[in-house]
Image (cartoon, rainbow, N blue to C red):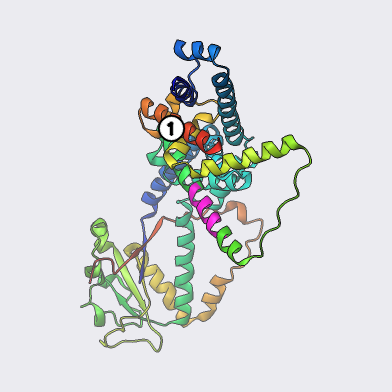
Amino acid sequence: MNCERIRKQILEALASASVEVSNEISSHLQACRACQEFHDRQALLFRSIDSAVRTLVNEPVPPSLLAGVRERLTKTAPSHAWGYVASAIAATAVLVLAWFFPVSLFRHTQEPNAVPASSALNYSAVQTTVQEAKRPAKRHRASRSEHHAIILQPGPLVTSRSPQPANSPQIIVDVKESQAIFLLAKAVYEEPKWGRAMLSPVPVPEDIAPSMKPVMVPDLEIKSIDEGGD
Amino acid sequence: MQELVLNPPGRALEGEAASQAEETGLRREFELRLAECGPLAFRVAQGVLRNAADAEDVAQEALLRAYRKFDRLRDANRFRAWLVRITFRLALDRWRSARRREQRENAWAMPERRPAPPTAEELAASNEFQNRLERALEELPDKFRMVLLLSAIQGYTLEEVSGMLGIPMGTVKSRLFFGRKQLAEKLR
């Protein structure tokens, strides 16, 4: 009976990894050979468990671990690079859309008279529709009046008040740049060779290149126009 | 429909420079944490998976996730605690899905051939013990297993384990006690 209690205590002492054994246990072990053997076996078992777990978790760290993380980090595009990518996509989209779709409509919210009078398009026909009124996002309230929508539609140039199909491709641009982009789109439509030239730029001669200043592409965001609006 | 909004160039460039500087700083700090905690992530994963290649993959995944959340994990202790938890969870997920796959494959496969018995008796005993220990570890409740693995990693004290897991020192000791006791019972 005493042995059973002592053995229970031995197991608890070994499981808690305590170095010291109580006086009661040590004096019993000196007197009882069977319990001493039990203690030795159990101590060996716990030492083996500790040793095996330590070996398992302390395996040498592969040298490729950190290099692999760095590589995977580099593969993940950094956030600021998205601005450049999106700018390039937007510029290409303007050129490609303008090439294939004649500019049929130019909606704006302000400065309607600033559009060149020589333009063949009828702006007055569409001034009643205000694109900015459809833009609901609170965080963009400050820039509401600073953007224009260029709507591109297949077919001949529209000069009437006919309503535009809801699914016509639209490009929302900064008001300062809208006229330039509009003129660009119009030029590409009237003279497709400009579009081709812009999509296949001529290499810059080496003697000119050093004098050129790098073009700074502004930051660009892509937001859903339907987000909470309409 | 997508809307493309072009910000005014000046403001955009200022913002660009600031965000680049921020990102460089963030990356530098992350590099420090990476060198410090990368091995820990590997060891936690290795303790669960017992396969260096899988453990490396899981540790890398955990470190990548840590990078994505690094703006909220800049404090070293917080980072380490978060990393240990996410690594353990990812490793468990990986281990469970591997086990499910294995069970599926075994259900359809021919009865597998048993490996030839090892020549040296000692080696056999040692391998058998290792296999039994691994099975016993798998059967341990997660909370015991995690404490057991973390406390076995070289260089970490029980106090540090308590900090990493966000549990009191007494709880660490009692989980360690029950974990070791259960392991011994399974292996006896």
The residue located at (54%, 16%) in the rendering is A32
Residue A138 seen in the current view: yes
Q: Which image quadrant is residue B127 in? A: top right
Query: In the rendered view, would you say A51 is above or below B49?
Result: above
In the image, A97 versus B59, the foreground residue is B59
The quadrant in which the C terminus of chain B is found is: top right
Determine crowd level at label 1: few under 14, some 14-19, many 20+ residues with C-alpha closer than 10 A: some
Under tag 1, what secondary structure? helix
Extreme-right residue of the structure: B119
Question: Which amino acid does the dot numbered 1 rest on?
Answer: Phe
In percent of width and height, residue B23 lies at: 45, 42
Kindly indicate the quadrant of the structure image that contains residue A60.
Answer: top right
Count of marks placed on residues:
1
| Residue B149 seen | no
- Chain under numbered label 1: B
Residue B174, horizontal then vertical, whole percent: 40, 29
Point out the image quarter for the N terminus of chain B: bottom left
Q: Which residues are magenta?
A: B92-101
* Residue under pointer 1: B178
Q: Is residue B176 magenta?
A: no
Q: Nearer the viewer, residue A137 or A131?
A: A137
- Answer above or below: position of A70 versus B37: below
* Picture quadrant of residue B60: top right
In the shown orientation, is residue A118 left or right of residue A13?
A: left
What kind of secondary structure does the magenta stretch mostly adopt? helix
